[in-house]
Amino acid sequence: MKLVYEGTQSEVLVGDVVHVDNTPYIIMGITEPHKPASTGHVWCQSMCERKYSSEWFPGVVKAKWIDCTDQ
């Protein structure tokens, strides 16, 4: 299973820069879903205020899981 951006289908990687509400964030970590009903999480750190971190569902950064064997 891997996380890809919905528009390009390119893999989401730690270190990528994404924009949420016009604010740039660096992806710091990715957690796969732990059960079929889960979506997993993406951890990001603000590039403007490095002290702020956020944990979001993949859809917030316009990403989705592919190659899921249990769905």
Image: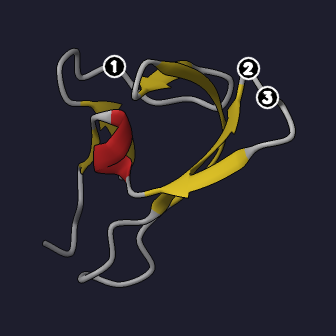
Amino acid type at circle 2 is Cys
Which residue is outermost to the left? 71
- Horizontal side of residue 11 vs 62, given as left or right: right
* Residue that badge 1 annotates: 10
Amino acid type at circle 3 is Glu
Q: Position of residue 47 (x, y in %)?
A: 72, 21
Q: Which residue does the image show at 34% across and 44% down from the upper left?
A: 60
* Residue that badge 2 annotates: 48
**Quadrant containing the C terminus in the rendered view:** bottom left
- Horizontal side of residue 17 vs 61, given as left or right: right
- Above/below status of 66 relative to 71: above
* Residue that badge 3 annotates: 49
Q: Which residue does the image show at 72% across and 47% down from the upper left?
A: 53
Q: Position of residue 12 (x, y in %)?
A: 46, 30
- Above/below status of 20 relative to 16: below
Secondary structure state at the residue bearing disc 1: loop
